[in-house]
Image: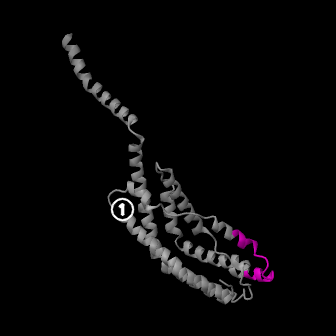
Amino acid sequence: MARAIAFAVAMLRPAVTARRAVTAAMLLLALAPTGALASAKDVAATHAYIQANYSLTNASVGLISRGQSKIEAFNSKLASECPLVGKGTPEDETSQPMSYEVAVALWAISYGTVAAPIAKFVAAVKPLHWSNQRITAIAHTYATSLHLMSTLSVPDLCAEVRAWKASGFHTVPSQVSQTDSSWEAIEGESVPRKLLAPYERGSDASLAARARSFEVKLAETEFMVGQDDWIQVLETLGLPE
């Protein structure tokens, strides 16, 4: 009998030890500081965001020429359908909404050209969360902003400027005001590098740096080439800057 009991105890000891180990592990996990648990989550979210942002910026740079071609075709169409339709527009603040509408049209074309890469970015970023709610908010707002900009319809500038002229250059068409307000309400920026840096691992830093170089190129193109395009379209329509 004693040998039987001893044998039973020996057989049960590994199971008891295993259960104790699991219990201890669960206890340690429960007592672990939330920062340690959040860190792994933050690292994973940061890696996914940097990957998505790199893919987006890389694709956007590759589509610059296509976007420019679309804008040039758009200007040619305006030149054919309604050249100098806004001639006589007063050069004061009353005409600013019309000039701004031209900029909105060009932005809509540019961001619409990158709609597919933007959709992939939004799908990758929207599920991400960080322990720092500020990072989460910036990332989600940026994704939402890009989605809105890439899906905005290109305004009918010929019809809008004709309506503006028909009013004696006194009444800005309601659709112009609505479009401008919608665009001005869009706010967003990519997550600042300094916020993500603590969670970068492996190749994250170098990939983030490359994405940043693409962002700089895109910003420069939007400012330099975009301004020239804006002026050209304004001249085509006969609108002041």
Outermost residue on the front side: it is: 92
Image quarter where the N terminus lies is top left
Can you give x and y, in whole percent of width and height, for residue 90 in the image? 74, 84
Secondary-structure class at tag 1: helix
Residue visible at 70% across and 87% down? 82
- Residue in front for this viewpoint, 157 or 208: 208
Using residue 139 as the reference point, say whether residue 85 is left or right of it: right
Q: Is residue 98 magenta?
A: no
Q: Residue furthest left?
A: 3
Local crowd size for mark 1, using a 10 Å CA cut-off: few (<14), some (14–19), many (≥20): some
Determine whether, in the image, residue 97 is placed left or right of residue 217. Answer: right
Q: Which amino acid type is marked by label 1?
A: Ala
Prevailing secondary structure of the magenta residues:
helix
For the point 72% across and 86% down, the residue is 86
Q: Position of residue 52 (x, y in %)?
A: 44, 62
Q: Give residue 40's position: percent from left, percent from top.
A: 38, 48
Residue at x-position 67% and y-position 75%: 155
Magenta residues, as a range? 161-178
Pointer 1: what residue? 205
Q: Quadrant of the C terminus?
A: bottom right
- Residue reaching furthest top? 1
